[in-house]
Amino acid sequence: MSKNNLLEKYKEKRDFSKTPEPENNGPITEGNLFVIQKHAASRLHYDFRLEINGVLKSWAVPKGPSTDPEVKRLAVETEDHPLSYANFEGVIPKGEYGAGPVIIWDTGTYTDINKKDGKLISMEESYKNGHIVINLHGHKLKGGWALIQAKIAGKPKNWLLVKEKDEYANKPENPESLDKSVVSEKTLEQVREDYESKNK
Ligand code: MN
């Protein structure tokens, strides 16, 4: 299957003559990119995306990540996104899928640390097993994180995002208070205002 076919669901949902979101997959990366986009669609959420096999596997996290290892955050799997989506910050216009402002809340690389009997399990295998364990090397989020498929009957898309216990646990204590883009340093509100002032 080609990369374009892999993004079929992504393309079906969008009209690229209307949305500024990217249509194509590039750029080529090191293979371990992660991004968390804060997105004020009809409901505010954080889109957690991990590069696996040439696409961004994606989960919508309504409450955002918690750095408290005791707190499990619901992460609902969404359609694969192109790698170029990691650079997207802007406003999805009214009437389009996911309408509303998006900021790059955190980004960086990740390291697979999921081991079984001392052997590293590939990201592809971890994803298939519904059990991902990674170190994040972000601006805001660092250290170990797990994404675990909840395995609730009839709800295969429900996963849980949990901080691992390490020196980065509870740091920062309130990640949701860090509300600016790590790229533009704008808040969602500023991105929306910029767009509205240009589209009067
Ligand atoms: Mn979203």
Image: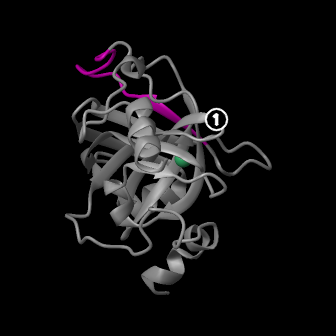
Residue 56 on image: x %, y %: 42, 60
The quadrant in which residue 191 appears is top left
Inspect the image, locate mark 1, and give the three-letter code of the amino acid beneath it: Arg
Q: Could you tell whether 70 is left or right of 179 in the image?
A: right
Display colour scheme: one colour
Look at 27% across and 40% down and name the residue there.
Answer: 135
The magenta stretch spans residue 187: no
Q: Assign the magenta stretch its main secondary structure.
A: loop
Farthest front residue?
200
Q: Dot 1 lies on which element?
A: loop
Camera sees residue 121: no
At label 1, counting other C-alpha atoms closer than 10 Å, the crowd grade (few under 14, some 14-19, many 20 or more) is few
Q: Which residues are magenta?
A: 159-172
Look at 52% across and 73% down and name the residue there.
Answer: 17
Farthest bottom residue?
1
Look at 64% across and 35% down and name the residue there.
Answer: 43
Q: Which residue is mark 1?
A: 43
Residue 53 on image: x %, y %: 38, 69
Q: Could you tell whether 45 is left or right of 137 in the image?
A: right
Residue 86 to residue 2: above or below: above
Q: Could you tell whether 134 is left or right of 199 in the image?
A: left
Q: How many marks?
A: 1
Residue 149 on image: x %, y %: 58, 45
Residue 36 on image: x %, y %: 39, 42
Q: Nearer the viewer, residue 59 or 131?
A: 59
Camera sees residue 153: yes
Q: Nearer the viewer, residue 118 or 150?
A: 150
